[in-house]
Structure formats: structure tokens, C-alpha cells
Amino acid sequence: MNSAGITYKPIRSFVKYLVDIHLFITLFAMFLSGLLLHFVIPVGRVSSGDKYFLGLHRHSWIDMHLFLALIFMTLVIIHVGINSKLVVQLTKQHFHKAGIRMFGAIAISVLLLMLGCWLVVAP
């Protein structure tokens, strides 16, 4: 509560709710577009007309899938940021001081590995 007696918890809960709903919708849309790309829209040498689904070409579906993934990752970062106190508290409970350093080292190593793989694979 602030000096005016207004509490901000309902607003924070509503923001958490909106982020969680958008996370679910984005994940579901990514799932559906991934299924379409893998099972429905053909890959390789087929006639150009076969690579269309609902009026969109396979490349458009791939772009949509990528943008959904970027939106999803942005929402995940926002979600973790909103719940950062809980994440820190639970991490401290499960990993003691030495474990927190190890957890941080592993997290940084994984991120560097992912960055390295991306740099190698990227055109």
C-alpha cells in the first residue's frame, strides 16, 4: 500500500494473468504452426501450388513460426522478471551459496554454448 492507501497487488496479478494467457496462446500457435510445417505443408521439390496452406506459402508459415518463437521468448523473460523474487528465493532454497555459483556458471555456460552454436549455424 502507498500513502494514499491504494494497493497494487490486483494490478500485478492481472498483469501476471495477461502474460500467462499470452504465453499459452503463443505456445499453442507455435505448436500448431510446427505441426503444419512438419506434417501438412510439403518440403522439397513439389509443385509451387502444393506449398500453400490457407493462402500462405510455406516460407510465410516459417516466418510466422519464428516470430511466434520470438514473442514467446520475450514473454518468458517478462514472466521470469515479474516472478524474480520467487525465482531467487526458490533458487536459494534449493542451491546453497556454493550451489548458486555453480548454477550461475552452468547457466552462463549454456548461454555461451547456444550463442556459439548460433554463430556457427547462422549464414
Image (spheres, helix red, strand yellow):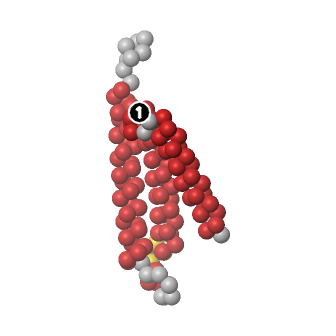
Q: What residue is rendered at 37% in x and 30% in y?
A: 11
Q: Residue furthest front?
A: 98
Of 37 and 123, nearer the camera is: 123
Q: Is residue 29 depicted above or below 86 in this figure? A: below
Q: What residue is rendered at 39% in x and 35% in y?
A: 93
Task: Residue 87: tell me if it is visible.
Answer: no
Q: What residue is rendered at 47% in x and 64% in y?
A: 65
Of 121 and 61, nearer the camera is: 121
Q: Which residue is mark 1?
A: 89
- Residue 119: where, in percent of width, then height? 64, 63
Total residue callouts: 1
Q: What residue is rendered at 40% in x and 43% in y?
A: 19
Element under disc 1:
helix
Residue 90 occupies which quadrant of the picture? top left
Q: Would residue 84 be found to the left or right of residue 21 on screen?
A: right
- Residue 51: where, in percent of width, then height? 46, 80
Kindly identify the amino acid type of the residue bearing the numbered disc 1. Answer: Gln
Mark 1 crowdedness (10 Å alpha carbons): few <14, some 14-19, many ≥20: few
Task: Residue 39: tell me if it is visible.
Answer: yes
Q: Would residue 120 be found to the left or right of residue 50 on screen?
A: right
- Residue 53: where, in percent of width, then height? 41, 75
Residue 89 occupies which quadrant of the picture? top left
Quadrant including the N terminus: top left
Q: Is residue 54 depicted above or below 26 in this figure? A: below
Quadrant including the C terminus: bottom right
Residue 83 occupies which quadrant of the picture? top left
